Amino acid sequence: MAPYWSRDFGNAASRTHRYGWRAEAAVELARERIAAALGAADPREIVFTSGATESDNLALQGVLGPGDHLVTVATEHAAVLDTARALTKRGVCLSVLPVDGDGRVDPADVAKAIEPRTRLVSVGAANGEIGTLQPLGEIARVCAERDVLFHSDAAQAVGKIPLDVEALGIDLLSCSAHKLYGPKGVGALYVRRRRRSGARLSLEPMLHGGGQERGLRSGTPPVPLIVGFAEALALALAEREAEASRLAALRDRFFALLTSALPGVQRNGPAEGRLPGNLNVSFAGVEADALLSQLEDVALSTGSACSSARPEPSHVLAALGLAPERARSALRIGLGRGTAAADVERAAARITAEVLRSRAEKAALGL
């Protein structure tokens, strides 16, 4: 990224001088690398945005209009659910499907929800709170059979699990660089150029101006961020299999340490078919918010970062059908490339000690 902060500071949209040419070449190389990494047939199918939230908005708002029908899932990220609810005020009809106890949607339910006016189905690839991986290929087949567009928010999945938009049959896919150790403030929306029927897939832009990104996202391209995005994705893919295996082993070790030391520990989400670095655990008799206040030396959360300011329990855990007490006692634990075995041992010990202390205090008060 460094040269594009200083030496090669040209505007990639300026095509009348060499400074712009060099910046444009860097952006187009990054586009090619990201397209190849996602399995896209054409680099022009990659539209750069500020991140997955903007990509989700562009996908939903760009496709749907008054009278159209959208099908999505109760455990989706707020970037999808809030956008979907906003669209209902513009005349879009919305169906929000339930999930099973592991957070997985049944493709048969998707098929039942599709009706003649259904224009788009949006199902996230992986849930950031409970790690659940959705059956994207099966859902895509259901959509293709009914000539309905399929969008997936894959911010949590890209670079972490195998993902190929062509092989899976995905029409629109959102991702963010920072979810795979790239820079914050840049992402992409994959937009299939041709639908299975041969018709061109067209979107209405949200931003108007200079017509950058094939008219879908006006604005000066952030060249350093785009370059960093492509490089981060390449590094993540080069290490993906080994890193996934390492993280899954650490995750399982973490859970084993907690369950061996504490009664009343329950995993939220599936034991299998989940992100390798995700663990969501409930501790009976303990309020997670109170627990977090005593664990300032451990980076944990009770839900997604985007919903951390909301006082109510996670909508994801509620969608699983968990009792409110269990949802309020849940911690979301994320493991990443900087996490070592010693970190897992220390964090498990810290959590165990605080849970025991909290339970002892409650018992002393007769609660």
Image (tube, helix red, strand yellow):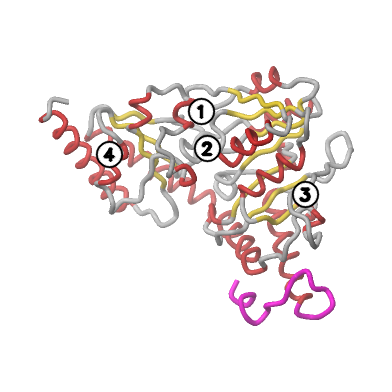
Kind of residue indicated by mark 2: Asn
At which x and y percent is residue 236? 56, 55
Tag 4's secondary structure?
Answer: helix
Dot 4 amino acid type: Leu
Residue with the mark numbered 4: 257
User: What is the quadrant of residue 250 in the picture?
Assistant: top left
| Residue under numbered circle 1 | 103
Q: Quadrant of the N terminus?
A: bottom right
Circle 1: element type: loop
Q: Nearer the viewer, mark 3 or mark 1?
A: 3
Mark 2 secondary-structure assignment: loop
Label 2 packing within 10 angstroms: few (<14), some (14-19), many (20+): many
- Which mark identifies residue 127? 2
Labels 3 and 1: the sequence-earlier one: 1
Q: Which residues are magenta?
A: 1-19
Mark with earlier residue (4, 3)? 3
Is there a contact, CB below 8 Å, between mark 1 and mark 2?
Answer: yes
Reading the image, the residue beneath label 3 is 205
